[in-house]
Image (cartoon, rainbow, N blue to C red):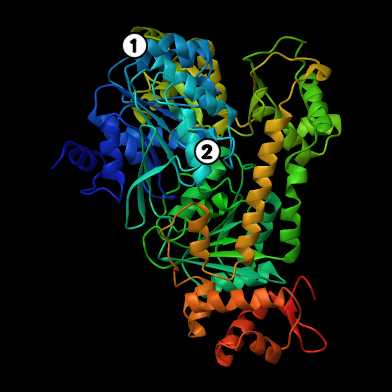
Amino acid sequence: MTDTQIILEKYWGHTAFRPLQNEIIDAVLQGNDTLAILPTGGGKSICFQVPALAKDGLCLVVSPLIALMKDQVENLKKRGIPALLIHSGMSRPDVVQTLKNATNNYFKFLYVSPERLETSLFKEYLPAIDVNLIAVDEAHCISQWGYDFRPSYLRIAELRKELPGVPVLALTASATEEVREDVCARLTSPTSPLTPVRTGMGGPLQRSGERDGVERNKREGWSVFRQSFERKNLSYSVFNVDSKLTKLVHVLQKVGGSAIVYCKSRKRTTEIAALLQMHNISATFYHAGLNNDERSKRQTDWINDKVRVMVSTNAFGMGIDKPDVRTVVHVDTPDCLENYYQEAGRAGRDGKKAYAVLLYETKDLEELAQLHTLRYPNLETIKKVYDAVVNFLQIPAYTGQDKSFSFRFEEFVQNFGLPATKTLYALKALESDGWFDFNERSFLSSMLVFSTSKTGLYEFYKSHPVHENLLTSLLRTYEGIFDYPSFISEKLIAKILKKEEADIETQLKTISAFGVINYMPRNEEPQIIFRKNRVPAGELSFNLMQYYKRRDVFIARTKKMIAYTNNIYCRSFFISEYFGDATAKACGVCDNCLRLKATELSVEEFENISSLVLTALSKSALTVDELLLHLPALKKEKLWKVIDFLQAEGKLRVDGLGRLGLTNFL
């Protein structure tokens, strides 16, 4: 048994790695910069956690998802692996203490949100931290052509100058070939003699082997591993319906087991959950507007099968490991295949038959085609929002750089009479241009660490005995809290002490004022961290060329999403092809493949006949007899089956003269 297998079994209880994990870990241990594209639920965290434990030193983990970082840190601690976390909402004393702890060889992981990387405080302590690996989670965020670009990720490249020779492991669940190239180029060490390849130069990924749907590449010193995007147990279906909710109920009644229903708005989550309950389907809802404890309870109830269906915005699912989800239904069309693939992929992780269902109405696709006009507001709107923000936060001109501000978005748009959705995207545009980091929600539990000695604590007990029970409960409930910051739950402590949660919060704030503890209550307000000094709106510089390029890439992604809904061939193949998976084959289990099976036509025959039919009808409308004259080599029975299929899919229509024609032209 190898060292890495021993580590895997010791801490995770597994005797074997999942596909590709072992190869990725070996590449990292050999000191290679490595890019790993593994599907949702594919075990990405193991790929950096195991090699980090196999080496001396500490693994620096960069992630934009604070709630997910918190969960991973807590899970590592439960396994007896010491880990730390620094994020944008922490106070300076807590950050200093955490960085001091990181210089101690006792800790194996330091999770950091990307905006922390360039702070003077972080840079001050970095030379004293023995970093053995940089793990970049959600690595697509560093690419401007990715679906979730985060400007703060660009700081990772600068970090590598401070850590020469330390390898990088970049991880993501979904990235197109263009994004993969961009990730490797942007993360290539500045001290490396290798020259990064620019996106779009063509063919930078040199194929060194492909088998079982797995790609193994070498490019510019990078090891690139991509698992197949095929999910052989997952059946994709798309339905154009008059009533989404009626169809949703039908799907959930037909397919049993745990389910997730995704929709776009918070209001819709509550309405749909109520509708399902009316049909005796156990359901609850989840969105970012719920408080931390309520989100946690609903998530736990669903994981433990106390509730069957979770109706949610896309705020739900990241980092959730529930393998027996049988159905994921989208009642609103996502804006890109990356999001759809990740969310749909939360079904059937146990390898058993599962279903991914997308419901849409024609107007949904029309709105999606115009979505870029909302997502990319004009420069005048961006400047107006910027001016309103700096006035709302009362930031004097030419000040504010690297300062953090609580930002109550709802109050902001009300005060200035701004449209909420367009304003949100103007803020994101300003973030993408590097003016500030905008965290809509931090989703963090409260944090606490003792800031006195054991002697000082004893003296405090003697002079303030009323607080002894609370402090003792904290020490008993949270191991290590005396020395290291820990996430706490005021609700749990209140239950233990049989008190009200508000009373516990008040008491903790009182004790903190005495300097016995550092208590940071949970912060669920959005945060803005300015990266540049405030300037008058008239002096606001903005890179319009990059902005319009990102808009064009967004338009291309929405067109692909629309094409997926209208696709008449294998849906799994369509997704795999989008992500550059050349090895994919027809799945045989999606709605389109099943229809083809019913016609007793092979996929190849169907594609060939439908292509001939669509080409012939693109020139003029024809009756079936006329079509047969144009295509004499085709058997009439097979032609009819393809025509029936194309009509059912809305590709063909029949006019008043009995002629077939393309829907767009009749």
- Give left or right: position of 660 versus 15: right
User: Could you tell me how many numbered marks the image carries?
Assistant: 2
Mark 2 vs mark 1, CA separation in Å: 62 Å
Q: From this viewpoint, is residue 491 visible?
A: no
Residue tagged 1: 454
Outermost left residue: 1
Closer-to-camera residue (441/29) = 29
Residue 600, compared with residue 108, is above or below; it is: below
* Residue 381 in picture, x, y percent from top left: 82, 32
Residue depicted at 22% across the width and 49% down the height: 16
Which quadrant: the C terminus?
Answer: bottom right
What residue is at 59 percent from the left and 71 percent from the top?
Answer: 568
Residue 598 seen anywhere in this rendered image of the structure: yes
Observer-nearest of 383 and 626:
626
Residue under pointer 2: 201
**Which residue corresponds to the image point at 32% horizontal and 17% vertical from the top-left?**
130
Which of the numbered marks, if any, corresponds to residue 97?
none
| Left/right of residue 528 with respect to residue 327 in the rendered view | right
The residue type indicated by label 1 comes to Lys
Whether residue 225 is situated above or below residue 137 in the rendered picture? below
The residue carrying pointer 1 sits among few (fewer than 14), some (14 to 19) or many (20 or more) residues within 10 Å by Cα, namely few
Q: Provide the secondary structure element on which disc 2 rests.
A: loop
In the drawing, does residue 15 fall left or right of residue 331?
left
Frontmost of labels 2 and 1 is 2
Q: Amino acid at mark 2?
A: Met
Quadrant for the N terminus, please.
top left
Image location (x, y in percent) of residue 504: 53, 27
Say which element carries label 1.
helix
Residue depicted at 46% across the width and 43% down the height: 203
Occupied quadrant, residue 418: top right
